[in-house]
Amino acid sequence: MRACPLCNGFQQLHKYCSKCGGILLDAGKITDYLDDYSAYMEMDLMKFLDGKRDSLKNHQCIHLLYCSQCHEEEHAIIQET
């Protein structure tokens, strides 16, 4: 079974904001923000709702990134290993 290296703490994200160049903070899976209970739903099922058509088939986890300097939000496609 594959796992997201960010969700499981195997690696850290090092990306910079495309707007201001500030450090982007990983805010977790994008699907965790759909509603109050989405963080507790089965992960493969939630991949149908993450906005990326092939994330389940391609073993990808979509994360929300946040810039604390300019408050910009970005998405990152993380390859599961």
Image: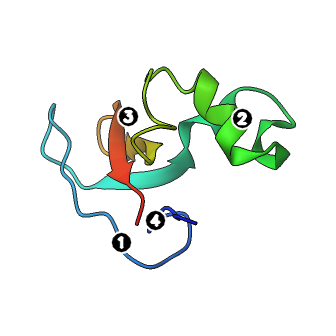
| Camera-side residue of 11 and 17 | 11
Q: Residue at x 49, y 20 (%)?
A: 51
Examine the image and state in which quarter residue 48 appears.
top right
Position of 76 relative to 12 (above/below): above
**N-terminal of the two: label 4 or label 3?**
4
Image location (x, y in percent) of residue 53 = 45, 20
Give x and y (percent) for residue 36. Answer: 85, 34
Residue 70 quadrant: top left
Q: Which amino acid type is shown beneath numbered disc 3?
A: His
Tell me the residue that label 1 is attached to: 12
Side of 46 where 29 appears, left or right: left
Residue holding disc 2: 45
Residue 41 point in image, percent of width and height: 82, 42
| 1 vs 3, front mark | 1
Whichever of labels 1 and 4 marks the residue nearer the N terminus, that label is: 4
Disc 3: which residue: 71
Q: Residues within 10 Å of mark 3 (few under 14, many from 20)?
A: some
Q: Which sits earlier in the primary sequence, circle 4 or circle 2?
A: 4
Q: Secondary structure at mark 2?
A: helix
Circle 4: residue type: Leu
Task: Using the image, determine if residue 44 lies above or below residue 81.
Answer: above
